[in-house]
Image (cartoon, rainbow, N blue to C red):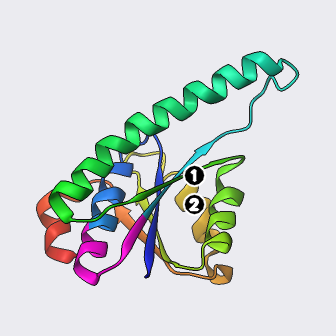
């Protein structure tokens, strides 16, 4: 089964990327893999504190994921899978694509403010010619109705 890989983070544009991935998966018989990345800890030498921070991050990710997963199941009939990786975002995204051969499309949300589309879109679009799969970039300002029309 072909899967759409979408990144779960705290950005506003993440919502449209999630919607798009779920709607496309529902209409094409695919699946959705939701990737959340825990950045490397700055205080690695404080092992106990680092473990507590890591566990708190995982709890926040699971709570955030459940909101999207419920919507995907209830509204689109898609049961997404959650993948949590630790490290720098771009290498971890590329690692997940490499590790899961069913991933066929990377879906990213583009920010709509003056600072640009966001760091992931900027970094990954620069290397898009060498990626093993296509990237779909979903504008952050796209309405829910427009998303439904184009998926």
On screen, 18 above or below 146? above
Quadrant assignment, res 86? top right
Tell me if mark 2 has few (under 14), some (14-19) or many (20+) residues whose alpha carbon lies within 10 angstroms of its own: few
Position of 146 relative to 51 (above/below) = below
Q: Is residue 76 left or right of residue 102?
A: left
User: Would you place residue 75 above or below residue 148 in this image?
Assistant: above
- Give the residue pinned by disc 2: 122
- Residue 117 visible at all: no
Residue at screen point 74% across, 37% down = 40
* Residue in the foreground of this view, choosing between 19 and 125: 19
Q: Which quadrant, please, contains the N terminus? A: bottom left
Q: Neighbour class for label 1 at 10 Å: few (<14), some, many (≥20)?
A: some
Q: Quadrant of residue 96?
A: bottom right
Residue 109 screen position, x and y as percent: 40, 58
Q: Secondary structure at mark 2?
A: helix
Q: Are marks 2 and 1 in contact (CB under 8 Å)?
A: yes
Residue positioned 35% across, 78% down in the render: 30
Which residue in the rendered view is the most extreme toward the right? 45
Q: Which mark is residue 119?
A: 1
Q: Residue at x 64, y 79 (%)?
A: 131
Instruction: Specify the segment rendered in magenta.
Output: 23-32
Secondary element type, mark 1: helix
Q: Main secondary structure of the magenta part?
A: helix
| Residue 64 drawn in magenta | no
Of the numbered discs in the image, which one, if any, rests on residue 20? none
Coordinates of residue 119 in the picture (x, y in percent): 57, 52
Residue 95 pos. (x, y %) = 69, 65
Taking the image as shown, residue 120 lies to the left or right of residue 45, namely left
The image quarter containing residue 141 is bottom left
118 sits left or right of 143 in the view: right
């Amino acid at each position: 089964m072909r899967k759409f890989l979408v990144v779960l983070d705290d950005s506003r544009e993440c919502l449209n990327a999630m919607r798009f991935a779920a709607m496309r998966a529902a209409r094409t018989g695919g699946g959705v893999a939701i990737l959340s990345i825990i950045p490397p800890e700055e205080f690695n030498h404080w092992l106990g504190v680092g473990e507590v921070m890591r566990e708190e991050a995982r709890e926040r990710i699971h709570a955030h994921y459940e909101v999207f997963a419920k919507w995907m199941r209830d509204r689109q009939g898609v049961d997404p899978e959650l993948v949590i990786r630790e490290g720098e975002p771009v290498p971890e995204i590329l690692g997940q694509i490499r590790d899961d051969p069913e991933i066929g499309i990377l879906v990213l949300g583009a920010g709509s403010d003056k600072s640009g589309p966001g760091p992931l879109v900027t970094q990954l679009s620069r290397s898009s010619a060498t990626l093993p799969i296509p990237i779909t970039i979903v504008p952050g300002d796209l309405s829910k109705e427009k998303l439904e029309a184009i998926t």
